Image: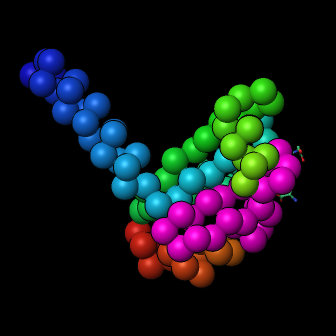
């Protein structure tokens, strides 16, 4: 039932999901502030993408260019041209702008 077509379908769905993502979050696994933002995003119906900004990674390089530092979490809402770098501000921004979306 979940043969080649199913696997390809899932891959396609994942690619579409990433393309549709409006919200990007630069983050690190062990970071409690990132965990708070991830937990909040998981509660919402938003599609979002996490970039792992571990030191030395390409994402850390991009983060540095965008924000001027490597502090995480860092949110990019490309559709609205918004970038935010404090976890409380990120949650407040999402709550204010996207609370109706799946919550
Ligand atoms: N006040 C910030 C604190 C964020 C923070 O301390 N992040 C740490 C990781 S847990 C970090 O990125 N440190 C590296 C740096 O600042 O360059 C927030 O709430 O987002």
| Residue found at the very far top of the displayed protein | 3
Query: Is 21 on the left-hand or right-hand side of 12?
Result: right
* Residue 71 % position (x, y): 83, 49
**Residue 43 visible (yes or no):** no
**Residue 93 visible (yes or no):** yes
When the figure is inspected, residue 54 is found, relative to residue 88, above or below; the finding is above
Query: Which corner quadrant holds the N terminus?
Result: top left
- Number of numbered discs visible in the structure rendering: 0
* Residue 67 % position (x, y): 78, 56
* Residue 31 % position (x, y): 79, 42
Q: Say which residue appears at 62% left-offset and 60% top-offset.
A: 76
Q: How is the image coloured?
A: rainbow
Q: Which residues are magenta?
A: 67-90
Is 75 colored magenta in this rendering? Answer: yes
Is 66 colored magenta in this rendering? Answer: no
| Residue found at the very far left of the displayed protein | 1
* Residue 102 % position (x, y): 41, 69
Q: Say which residue appears at 25% left-offset and 36% top-offset.
A: 12
Q: Say which residue appears at 59% left-offset and 81% top-offset.
A: 96
Query: Is 59 on the left-hand or right-hand side of 55?
Result: left
Quarter occupied by residue 77:
bottom right
Q: Say which residue appears at 68% left-offset and 75% top-offset.
A: 92
Quarter occupied by residue 83:
bottom right
């Amino acid at each position: 039932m979940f043969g080649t077509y199913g696997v390809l379908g899932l891959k396609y769905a994942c690619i579409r999901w990433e393309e549709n993502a409006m919200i990007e979050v630069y983050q690190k696994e062990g970071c409690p502030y990132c965990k708070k933002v991830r937990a909040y995003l998981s509660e919402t119906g938003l599609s979002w993408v996490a970039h792992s900004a571990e030191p030395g990674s390409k994402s850390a390089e991009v983060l540095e260019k965008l924000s001027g530092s490597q502090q995480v979490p860092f949110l990019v809402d490309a559709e609205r041209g918004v970038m935010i770098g404090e976890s409380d501000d990120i949650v407040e921004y999402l709550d204010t702008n996207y609370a109706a979306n799946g919550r």
